[in-house]
Structures are given as C-alpha cells and as structure tokens.
Amino acid sequence: MRILVTGASGFIGGRFARFALEQGMEVRVNGRRAEGVEHLVRRGAQFIPGDLGDPELARRVCQGVETVVHCAGAVGNWGRYQDFHQGNVVVTENVVEACLKEHVRRLVHLSSPSIYWNGRSRLGVTEEQVPRRLHDAYATTKYLAEQKVFGAQEFGLEVLALRPRFVTGAGDVSIFPRLLKMQQKRRLAIIGNGLNKVDFTSVQNLNEALINAVLAGNDALGQAYNISNGHPLPLWDVINYVMRRMDLPQVTRYRSSGLAYSLGALNEGACLLWPGRPQPTLSRLAVQVMNKDFTLDISRARQQLDYRPQVSLWAALDEFCGWWKAQHGGH
C-alpha cells in the first residue's frame, strides 16, 4: 500500500511514517523541514517538501497514493486566529480537495480532544460531547477541519478522524520540555490539590491506532475516535515521575488555582502588549489544564478499530526521558 503522511517533520507524523515503513508500506512524506525527515528518507520514504497551504502542492503530493494520513497542522494555545485557521482549516481543505481530485481512497485525519475543553473538569468524555461553544482558536479550527473531512464522505472519500490525548514518547517536544525548563528554574508549582486525573497516549499506541484506521473495514468509516492509553492518572504524579527520571527535584510547592489563574491572565496581558507577542510562560488555559480532571472514553476505538493500547505510560515516559537526555546531554 502506498500512503502519504503529512506533517512528517513533526513528532506524531514522523513517528507514524517510520512505523508505516517498518510495516512494509510504501511511504511518501511531506513536511516543511527537510532535516526533520532525513531519517525517513534514509529508510526509504519519498519526500516532497512544501507548504500544503498551496493547493497545487497538496494535489501533487496526493498523486498516486491510496491513503493519506493527515498529521500536519498548527498546534498550541497562543497566537492569531488567522494563523490557526490557515494551518488547520485551509490546509485540511486543500488536502481533502486533493484527495478527491486524485481519487485517493481513504483519508485518516489527526484531530484533537482539545475540542471538548470547556475549562471545567470532565471525566469519560465521549466523541459526541463537543461543547456548543469551543474554547479557543486551536480547538475551533481543529473542529472546523474535522467538519471539512467528514463533509467529503458524500463525494466518496473514506474518512476517519482520531483525537489522541497528550501524546508522548521519544520526540515529544510539546508536553514535558517546558515543564522541565520551568522546574530547572524552580518556577513550577502544583496548581490546586494535585489530585486531578488526566489521560496520556504512548506514541507507540497511537501508531497502532493510526495503522488500524488505515486498514479498518467499512463499519469504522465516517467517525471520530478518542485515543488514549485508557488509564487516567493523577497529572502531578506523572510530572514528578519525569522529574525523578531527569534527576530534577520533585514539584512540592502548591499554588491556589485562583491565584494561578489571575497570574496567567496578567501574564497574557503583558505578552499581548510586548513586541512580537511572545508566548506567556503561564496562561489561563495552562492553569486550567494543570488542575482539572480530563479523561476520555475510548470504547468506540476499542470496538470499531480494535484498538488495544499495549504500551504503558511509564514505558512511554522512560522512552521520552532517554531521548531527551540523549538530545540535551543529560539535562
């Protein structure tokens, strides 16, 4: 099978492209950074560089492939709405259009459970429980992108969307690196009571879910799927496990959620006034994420995609820590 993986110079796209090559698939990759896909090219992937914001480029990368796994997109919780719209909605529109014009059979779209976020604790969230009002630019544009994908069904494209939560493992540059840097400066504090439970996903488990989506039968089509390890854990236990593995002090200071939220608001205001609008070290969203329960119901993925998460979070964290130490000389 010949597949295209977009966003392959990033963490999730790169790890999945490598996994697909290991499964014996013929893999084409797209990404903005050539150095980010060199390891894939050495393993036999075909690389077509370029920005999928260009509809012609999107069509060219889709020529002659059977399935597209669309991992490219704008991520984060800080920035201009138009940048998120371009990176998530416009790019996805171009990929969908290219799939239809080039007669691609299936599109597997990487979405996000951020669309469920409403600032409050939520346990066992199912795929239908999307709030009426989406929380921020990232969540809004990821949801709009999903709708573009599902809208292509009526034109004959086979589609599925996966919503993985807190993906980690070797290559993760989004979850733990900032926390490590903050704790190195002794700026990290437990927000609230420190007992809030959250879901994580080993990148190896996500790879299995993605490959199952690529190969799934017709009954699985046209749906979104929550993906996680299926075992929620107290967030601060996980963070302190990583601190121990990285030979850093445990996070033991506590800060009230109300005070932290106010500090986040002040931080955001200052960054909006600062030239270049740098990302705040503490935001209101980050404060909420760090002290609220947020877990997913993965029953649908278990039933329809035969998703069976095998790799524990602790194994994924060990993988991340080993990789991070190798990259940064043990720090």
Image (tube, grey):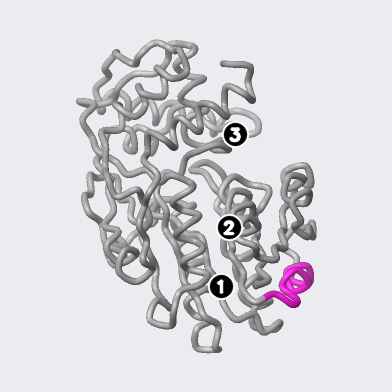
Residue 73 showing in the rendered view: no
Residue at 43% x, 20% y is 245
**The disc labelled 3 sits on which kind of residue?**
Arg
Residue 26 showing in the rendered view: yes
**The disc labelled 2 sits on which kind of residue?**
Cys
Left or right: residue 109 compared with residue 98: left
**Highlighted magenta segment, given as a residue range:** 55-65
Q: In this view, does 192 lie above or below 127?
A: above
Report if residue 328 lies within the magenta region.
Answer: no
Q: How many labels does the image show?
A: 3
Left or right: residue 161 compared with residue 291: right
Left or right: residue 78 compared with residue 4: left
Percent from the top left, x then y, of residue 128? Answer: 29, 67
Q: Of label 3 and label 1, which has the lower sequence position? A: 1
**Comparing labels 3 and 1, the label whose residue is closer to the camera:** 1
The CA distance from mark 1 to mark 2 is 11 Å
